[in-house]
Image: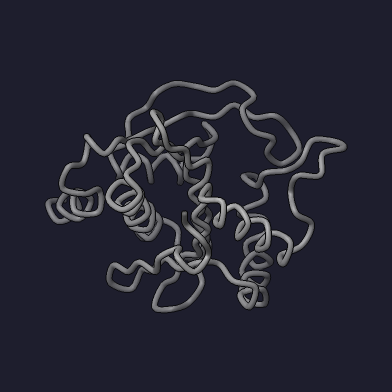
């Protein structure tokens, strides 16, 4: 079973993934504050009366670590040369005959479009496929989110359709597009395929 200490540190050049921790609070809060307008339109919210989104950073970390201990979540922060620049969470980890998970992420606006998120997602996907034995990883994104569309396109993820009113985002139930990739699609690893495709561009 995966726990917080077992959430691996992964690295590709200057881009890293490591487990989120409570002492990230000042850096995380400053980053979110600087990017408030950039991220607000994509942030998950709770419907009226719901209490499932933790109200503080410490509560969020405790919730993520509990999910990690249960083997359902990989709560990473994205780093660039050791500096926290975003977050990648692989959640909904299921085993048995499904062996699937979903990924969500956000990034500092100043790092958007620089290839950081595709590499982070590729590292996370390879860990899920090769170390956890998962078969499928999906990303659900708003149709209007052009930056996230570029991420899944760079990764060569397959478009599978629209999920109407799928997640509560910025105050409303929003439609999402579903993209997915399976271990069979990338026998040599998703990061390796991404790096090869980038090198030939």
As drawn, 198 above or below 8:
above
x 65%, y 45%: residue: 41
Q: Residue at x 30, y 44 (%)?
A: 155
Query: Percent x, y for residue 68?
Result: 55, 56
Residue beneath the point at 76% across and 41% down:
46
* Position in image of residue 29 (x %, y %): 68, 70
- Nearer the observer, 91 or 104: 91
In the foreground, 35 or 116: 116
Report the colour scheme: one colour
Question: Image quarter for residue 115?
Answer: bottom left
In the displayed structure, 24 sits above or below 143; it is: below
So how many labels did they put on this image?
Answer: 0
Farthest residue toward the left? 200
Q: Residue 171 occupies which quadrant of the picture?
A: top right
Task: Determine the residue located farthest toward the right in the rendered image.
Answer: 49
Q: Is residue 70 left or right of residue 11?
A: right
x, y percentage for residue 200? 12, 51
Give the side of residue 170 with respect to residue 184, left or right: right
Task: Residue 13 in the image: state x and y as whole percent.
Answer: 28, 71
Q: Is residue 26 above or below residue 54?
A: below
Q: Is residue 107 visible?
A: no
Q: Is residue 18 visible?
A: yes
Residue shown at 56%/57% (left/top)? 69
Occupied quadrant, residue 195? bottom left
């Amino acid at each position: 079973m995966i726990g917080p200490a077992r959430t691996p540190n992964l690295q590709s050049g200057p881009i890293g993934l490591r487990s989120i921790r409570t002492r990230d609070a000042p850096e995380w809060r400053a980053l979110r504050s600087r990017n408030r307008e950039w991220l607000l339109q994509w942030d998950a919210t709770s419907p009226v009366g719901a209490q499932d989104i933790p109200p503080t950073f410490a509560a969020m970390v405790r919730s993520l670590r509990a999910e990690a201990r249960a083997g359902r979540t990989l709560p990473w922060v994205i780093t660039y040369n050791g500096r926290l620049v975003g977050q990648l969470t692989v959640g909904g980890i299921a085993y048995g005959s499904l062996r699937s998970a979903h990924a969500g992420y956000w990034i500092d606006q100043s790092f958007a479009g620089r290839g950081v998120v595709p590499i982070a997602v590729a590292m996370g996907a390879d860990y899920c496929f090769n170390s956890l034995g998962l078969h499928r990883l999906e990303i659900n994104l708003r149709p209007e989110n052009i930056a996230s569309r570029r991420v899944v396109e760079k990764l060569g993820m397959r478009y599978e359709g629209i999920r109407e009113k799928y997640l509560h985002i910025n105050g409303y139930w929003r439609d999402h597009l579903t993209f997915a990739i399976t271990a069979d699609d990338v026998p040599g690893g998703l990061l390796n395929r991404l790096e090869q495709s980038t090198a030939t561009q």
